[in-house]
Amino acid sequence: MTSLLSLFVLAALWGSSFLFMRIAANPMGPALLIEARVVLAALTLLTIATLWRKRLDFLAHPKHYLILGLFSTALPFVLIAYAAQTLNASTLSILNSTAPIWGALISVVWGGNRLTNKFMMGLALGVVGVCVLVGKEARLVGWDAALPMLCSVSAAFSYGIATNYTKIAPKVSSFNNAHGSMWGASLLLLPLALLMPAREPLTLEIGLPVLALGVFCTGLAYILYFRLVDDIGAASALSVTFLVPVFGILWGHLFLGEPVGWNTLIGTLLVLAGTSWVTGFSVSQLIKNTRSS
């Protein structure tokens, strides 16, 4: 039950990240917002590493940390932040949940995994779910939402690349992967952040969400995620993907007054059903693993 509670806490944290980006993306701009996010996360992980006496030798695997930082952090975070200037938090969280579908699809091309009927059906369900969201959002926001939606889906695709890259990457501990990738992302994003300053003066109303985004939704959330990986395994820990949209929709509705329409609910169900079919993950598997942990 402890693992199950941790899973919900992690989903709540990651779900709230879309809320905080929605608040801060327009006044700060995507580049500076994400640079602040990853630097705060890196400093949080550095503090924890010092307390736990975990040493990060960045120069031992600089290429690895930069690649991981690019595809797992810098690129998807900036793309989501750009999309957050236009799209609501619930839509962002649902589109982000397609990451396992992209990861599985990339593994077919990259790793030579076999296409099955169940895989193809899951992929089709996911695509239909995204189309339901895109069609309704386009009518509400206008076709200006097309590029932000493409960016959001591209961020999920980037996560899929990162997932497959880790299968061939140097063998580094989960904690050091999280810690090193944050410093790698910080270095990669620094020139972009310097070229794109904040659009508005930093206020408490903007600063607090950014602080929460970096420290809690990124730094501490990564610690919680990798602890779950150790406790219940990577496959079950990835089931957080199914819970994040629930919290993304909830926080957006409670704090930003975002409407929860039929397209949101149907699109979410289709995307999550497709993800379940593509990845072969079942809720019963999660319950069994968390009970035994």
Image (cartoon, grey):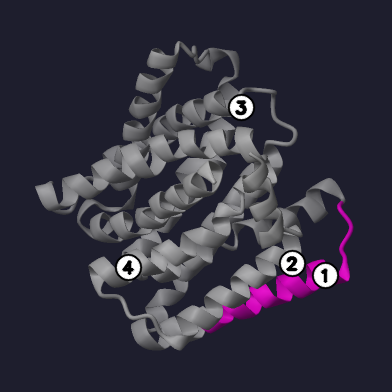
Q: Which residue is mark 1?
A: 118
Is residue 155 found left or right of 173 in the rendered image? left
**N-term-proximal mark, 4 vs 1:** 1
In the figure, 254 relative to 229: above or below? below
**Mark 2 residue element:** helix
Q: Magenta includes 61?
A: no
* Kind of residue indicated by mark 1: Lys
Query: Residues at badges 2 and 1 in contact (C-beta under 8 Å)?
Result: yes
| Residue occupied by mark 3 | 64
Q: Which residues are magenta?
A: 113-132
Dot 2 and dot 3 residues touching (CB under 8 Å): no
**Residue visible at 71% across and 55% down?**
285
Instruction: Give the residue drawn at x 64%, y 22%.
Output: 172
The type of residue carrying mark 4 is Gly
Where in the figure is residue 222, as x and y percent of width and height? 47, 37
Q: Amino acid at mark 2?
A: Trp
Label 3: state its secondary structure: helix
Q: Is residue 91 visible?
A: yes
Magenta segment's dominant SS is: helix
Q: Quadrant of residue 190?
A: top left
Dot 4, how many residues are within 10 Å of its Cα: few (below 14), some (14-19), or many (20+)?
A: many
